[in-house]
Amino acid sequence: MTTVAIIGGSGLTNLKNLRITRREVIRTPYGEPSAPMIFGQLGGQEAVFLPRHGPGHTIPPHEVNYRANIWAIKQTGVSKVIAVNAVGGISPDFQVAGTLVIPDQIIDFTYGRAHTYFGSEHKKVTHVDFTHPYCEELRQTIIHASGRAEIRVMGRGTYGVTQGPRFESLAEIRRMERDGADIVGMTGMPEAGLARELELCYASIALVVNPAAGKTTETISMKEIETNLETGMGSVRSLLEQVIPLIAHG
């Protein structure tokens, strides 16, 4: 049985090293997922892949149907989910482009997103524990795999999630830094919360593609970000090839 799902973010709309065996369109009560689920083998093990922004990277972060995506992933029978996120660096140790971060905490600055499966249609109010938003077992497996792949990662960090699609203002980054965010991106929530509601073991590999607003004298450049994405995703793919077998044999 397939036990691992990978959610691809910006720069990872396809897994070049995934040997595809089939594609499946999964219907959900929450509408259409971003794309058909792609099943295949990675590192010699079964895996399923879903591009968060669609096959052609056409869905902006605030319009991703996170509920449909996570629900569809659950329906494939997986128990573990690795999300890939492109982020900006806030804290000094997190600002170098190409840095891989395995965050252990998250702060949600988004608004207006459908963020729960437990709405008013349920007969009783339902709460889930989110003290530790990422699956620690999976986080440690990724960190261990990075050593085997000889890829340096930051083994902790707080991910601040903003609405997008615009980048943040200098004042917003200053506020996030005061709040304790080390990195900033637009796709970490409600994805992580929804995975917890469906009792999925969920962790993130966040790739720093630029210093956040005000952390450099340069204007944030999409061309530079795209270059850093292309380079950094090579490391992400190599890391995933090491992680998937560890999970399968763990």
Image (cartoon, rainbow, N blue to C red):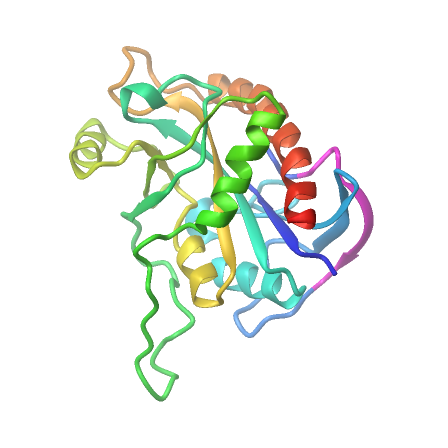
Residue shown at the point (37%, 58%) measured from the top left? 113
Q: Answer with the quarter of the image where residue 89 lies.
A: top left
In terms of depth relative to the viewer, which is nearer, 10 or 246?
Answer: 246
For residue 130, side relative to residue 63 (left or right): left
- Examine the rendering and report whether any part of residue 62 can be seen: yes
Give the residues drawn in magenta, as a range: 14-25
Q: Is residue 150 left or right of residue 44?
A: left
* Residue sticking out furthest to the front: 250
Residue 36 in magenta stretch:
no
Image position, residue 103 (x, y; %) = 39, 39
Residue closer to the observer: 110 or 1 = 1
Indicate the position of residue 190 as horizontal and vertical percent values.
Answer: 40, 55
Query: In the image as oriented, which residue stretches furthest toward the top?
Result: 217
For residue 95, what is the image quadrant?
top left
Q: Residue at x 31, y 72 (%)?
A: 127
For the N terminus, which image quadrant?
bottom right
> Taking 200 as reference, is 28 above or below it?
below
Q: Residue furthest right?
A: 21
Residue 147 rendering spot, x and y as whole percentages: 56, 26
The answer, for residue 32, to whether it is visible in the render is no
Residue at position x 67%, y 64% in the image = 76
On the image, the x and y values in percent for residue 219 come to 33, 16
Q: Residue at x 61, y 31 (%)?
A: 239
Looking at the picture, tell me which residue is in the foreground, 164 or 43: 43
How many discs mark residues in the rendered view? 0
